[in-house]
Image (spheres, coloured by chain):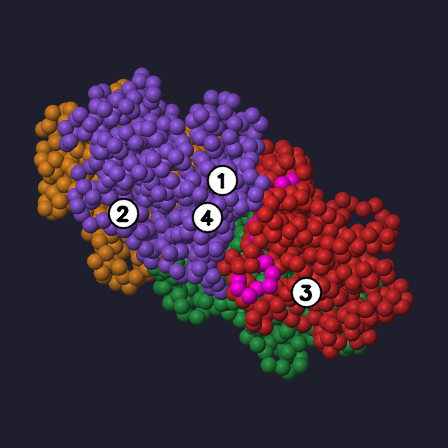
Chain colours: A purple, B orange, C green, D red
């Protein structure tokens, strides 16, 4: 049976809402049954009709969605709610959904503030509902393979982690035009205290902790607002220290003019290193000291179950961003179903980001912005 | 409104059936309503149930599917039938579907023989139904861009076309084990007179005619069965002549041990050239004489409407094989709906392979196998 | 002690003469002592002076060079003569040099006709002098590694060989302007019966026999003169058969507009394949069935003695075309010296192309042009 | 006429001495006439004999070299002295050479301490001799092109500079074995106060100032000694601020296990960016906002005179590390000769690193090590 899915946000013109819907469809684990697609009721309705929803399941607000859905009979009622609104509308609907027994898929970063994320964490613990935070890049098979490789110990102790997310799309004052994406992402009232660091810095942060299996415990940030008139940071670079003694660098910028979205991670240990980048997403470069570099590929028979269960096609037929996103949705669905059916959970199904990643991501934002303002070199990573 | 989709073939364990279903789901233009997933009724049923179909819409045979569906009220009845069976079960269900007013999406190569393809072409003309042949690679945005570039005349007269499809998966006698994909593809009773040439040679052939906008009129083939005991060709190379005087080379092999599916095409004219390969599917290399090579990318604002309408995500978030496949499904749906609603058809919607490509592909198979057996250098491309 | 080197051809404005001289200098095994750099005595003199030669060792003609040098005392006399003239001035000076006891380094293709090459072969056998034909690409460390890998048997029986040499520099009628390189290479009186096939087809031919360790015994060629007014072929594609039953494709074209000099070879056997291309010259892609592709690199500690002895710098500091060329010169010098000193010759030193490759290259030209004109599919490779 | 070259250091077993000698030979501008190749007279002699030097020009010490050479008649005497010793033997011989009227080519980093570099700078100014510091990477044609592009203003104001030099060869305690390169480079008595930062950090530093045309005025460093027992840093990452307000990141590490020498630089301005890396040394990626990325290539007819005059072969025949090094030697020779002949100097000839770069490099070392020890975030770049 498919899970009944509702959506908050993601109306016409939104970018990430459409991505979530495709991700939900790819593996046929969900059926979209309702939505509150916009704070503007007319727009919500128009969007819902385009998605072939019944009019009575298209709501004027997220509050109405939760209110009405919980009154429906259990076999009709929405089960999972995807929240794809700007950051300032994450916490309230997520908390309400969770408290009313709905499972939640939430776009990143988790919330508007760290405090909200910690509150959400408590709510999730108390309600026992399932929660997924869509850090897309962890859904790529070769990112999963990188993590498995790092965890396997074959690299020895991890020493260095380099992660970078260079974008160029905010090189001009885009928020001055009617670029909807640019507008809310550069608006402190909607985005929070961070711009680039919240939007893509959190992806980079999550990726480096996910792949290395390590946690950052100190950082030293250079945070910049490069484009004149912009209200939030659009650029930053961060020196990192990890609990095991490793060190690293995180780069996130939206003013690297000419760059697309080539998020890239490299991890080095005593015996070798790993490299993955979105521009060649189905490849994991495995470097072992004094040996030829190995090119591990999505679909390779030698890959781990974590890669294989997140792959749909034979090696050489590229899977991309939408499939990575779909892996989050599918693994979440398998987890939700197994839990509800009391079935044994496979480790591969549980391999999606949750509220712990959400809290750490929000802590990253607060710590990195604090460090950016500090004259001290090192800022402790506090939660 | 979604189109009602039925499927013939594609039961559990099949590869391409699952791909078709994902492709149909991605853009939400179809709803799977029925299927005859296997010639084994039990397997058909099991497969259909896994796909959440009502039991009464899961059929024991394709004949039953067509028979029963046409008796359903128009607003329930299947509208589009996807046929994803081995080649020897293409023609009969396709013809029956078309004759009963259903639109058809057919996996390639079109049929078992050229004669069948020509028959199908006539049927389509007579019935006025819509037909799509799933030559996946034409669905890639950057393949479409390559075609638009070649057609634009910017390269000048096209002189050279090189296309290659190297695979390695049949390097051993796989049909000796229980590899289902290998078994039918190397079996003349199921595949037809060609192995590699039918399976991937037709893709390469289609790609070079699609991108160049030219037609082959002569060929000279070296066709080999490399692996001992194999009943069909697993390797070939073909010299090509085009009607405009251009020449080229087509390589298709399944014994290039270590290769995945890196189909690649290069086209050169008087003023420059183009290169695309699946391993870097979102890139089109544009080479103009005495200028720096340009890297055109999926999602680039400078791309044509043909690329842009077949792209879902911003540049740098890779779209892959499944999205290319989905582009065929979506464009077909837009065409079917526009036709049924009497709406104006956009050129971009019509940009999917049809029966003409199917007939030419089958002619390629017959001509290339004939040439392989001939002592003459050049064989005319006859239909 | 350095070998005393003389040069025939390679005056001001010539391309390949300068390359030979750099190649000779890189490893300090030669000292340029004399030359006849042009058939125009004034130009020869001017060229020699620029090269810091004593005026009395700059000659008006190659005949004079040989005549005068042989009269010098042995410890002054030139020992090795490099011949870097257009093809029609290869045979006579080479033969004269050999007959007068000088060792010869000759640019490819060996001669103007196959007959001349066979004559030269006899001369070399009779005189016992040393001879090197500068098929540059065999000098690359990773090309040598490819050969060693193929010969090692790790690929199993070789089945497929694909080689290509795409250039774009003759896409226009360059010989109509004062492009000196274009003029003689497209002139049958200077180049011989072949244009592209002689100039770069022979490189491709040599590379595929060198790397695979196999010999071609049949071919089927499509030879074209694409640019109007051109007197020789500027494009061709050839189907290949090898004595061990393998087959392949050779592509050589000078009208692939936008291409530079990316000669590329791929060899596949029962268990895997190899790929090398000049654009990434320090990399050898090693593909083994069902394993990650391995990236073997110049300077890698795991490479063979053949690669290591032809490498000067640590891995990652790229060595290029001039170093590959220098490897031919150095290995030839080591061979000449060892022979003259009666020392044991290492296999690595002998690993440079000689007259056998020269004869086969000229046979390739004659056979491929004959095949291009033939209606028969297969032409036996005869010498 | 060739310049008479002497060498201090670079005896048998040394790495960089051989590189310098090849670089000096490639363009035939130098003749090696003398050397003091080792502090061990026997080794110096053996090395010199292998290089075909007269015994009386092989010296027991650098002091003797300078003493004896200055007594030779001017037309025999050495003109340019290359110093290729470990850092602690840079200053004294360089100063002595300059004071005795010899031109000097010095391996990087300039000296053992900043103070020495400043002293050398004064000496050069006072003596009017020519001086070259061999920051190899500035010799690559596409690095020169990058600089010209950045200086042209086409990128607009430069905002970001990322430079990295990842190596893996010191991932183990190599200095514990008899690895000569590792031993002196990790020994504070021979290398100075910095390990990785001196050895490769200075290259990265120089490259980012050279390409961007900017100067660093603040930095914040994380400097690590990762391998146990090592006496100097083997890893570091540095946040950078430039005088024009731009910011950046410099990474230099010798413990990125599996990496070779892929130094890489990226520069972004308001309108676009540039990327160059040694692994693809003949390519410059030019990214302009909203346009296809352009691939500029060594040998491209569209490149600047700075690239073209530092290129020897047609596009697609790769030139590498030794040619880049040779460009420094050739440009230095052209400068020395033009100056001595009172000729007009071309800007392209003067395009090699000199003592200003040497002083800044030594200041980088002192500032970056100081910053590494500081609790303050930003350290001013002082000289």
Q: Nearer the viewer, residue D129 or D323?
A: D129
Q: Which residues are magenta?
A: D227-242
Q: Which mark is residue D190?
A: 3
Residue under pointer 4: A217
Q: Position of residue D355 (x, y in %)?
A: 76, 52
Residues at marks 2 and 1, CA–CA distance in whole angstroms: 31 Å
Q: Position of residue A186 (x, y in %)?
A: 48, 28
> Nearer the viewer's eye, disc 4 or disc 3?
4
Taking the view exactly as shown, the residue that stands out farthest to the top is: A42
Answer yes or no: is residue A114 visible: yes
Is label 4 on the same chain as label 1? Answer: yes
Residues at marks 1 and 3, CA–CA distance in whole angstroms: 39 Å
Q: Quadrant of residue C334?
A: bottom right
Q: Chain of mark 2?
A: A
Residue under pointer 2: A349
- Residue A285 colored magenta? no
Q: Quadrant of residue D287?
A: top right
Q: Decide: marks 2, 4 in contact (CB < 8 A)?
A: no
Q: Chain of mark 1?
A: A
Q: Position of residue C284 (x, y in %)?
A: 49, 60
Closer to the chain start, of discs 4 and 1, is 4
Residues at marks 4 and 1, CA–CA distance in whole angstroms: 12 Å
């Amino acid at each position: 049976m498919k899970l009944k899915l509702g959506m908050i946000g993601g109306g016409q013109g939104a970018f990430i809402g459409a991505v979530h819907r495709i991700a939900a469809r790819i593996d046929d684990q969900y059926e979209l049954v309702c939505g509150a697609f916009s704070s503007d009721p007319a727009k919500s309705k128009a969007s819902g009709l385009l998605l072939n929803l019944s009019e009575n399941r298209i709501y004027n607000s997220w509050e109405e969605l939760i209110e009405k859905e919980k009154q429906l009979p259990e076999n009709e009622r929405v089960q999972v709610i995807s929240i794809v609104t700007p950051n300032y509308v994450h916490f309230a609907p997520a908390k309400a959904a969770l408290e009313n027994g709905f499972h939640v898929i939430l776009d990143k970063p988790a919330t508007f503030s760290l405090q909200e994320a910690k509150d959400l964490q408590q709510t999730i613990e108390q309600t026992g509902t399932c929660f997924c935070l869509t850090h897309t890049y962890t859904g790529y098979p070769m990112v999963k393979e990188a993590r498995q490789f790092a965890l396997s110990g074959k690299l020895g102790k991890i020493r260095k982690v380099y992660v970078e997310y260079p974008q160029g799309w905010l090189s001009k004052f885009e928020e001055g035009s009617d670029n909807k994406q640019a507008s809310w992402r550069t608006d402190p009232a909607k985005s929070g205290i961070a711009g680039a660091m919240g939007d893509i810095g959190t992806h980079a942060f999550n990726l480096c902790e996910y792949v290395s299996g390590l946690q950052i415990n100190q950082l030293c940030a250079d945070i910049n607002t490069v484009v004149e008139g912009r209200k939030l940071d659009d650029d930053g670079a961060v020196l990192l220290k990890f609990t095991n003694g490793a060190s690293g660098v995180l780069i996130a910028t939206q003013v690297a003019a000419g760059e697309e979205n080539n998020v890239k991670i490299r991890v080095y240990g005593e015996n070798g290193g790993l490299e993955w980048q979105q521009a060649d997403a189905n490849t994991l470069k495995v470097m072992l000291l004094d040996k030829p570099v190995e090119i591990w590929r999505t679909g390779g028979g030698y890959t781990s179950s974590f890669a294989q269960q997140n792959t749909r096609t034979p090696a050489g037929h590229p899977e991309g961003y939408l499939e990575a996103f779909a892996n989050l949705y599918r693994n979440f669905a398998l987890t939700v179903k197994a839990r509800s059916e009391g079935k044994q959970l496979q480790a591969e199904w549980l391999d999606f980001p949750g509220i712990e990643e959400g809290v750490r991501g929000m802590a990253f934002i607060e710590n990195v912005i604090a460090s950016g303002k500090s004259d001290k070199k090192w800022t402790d990573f506090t939660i």
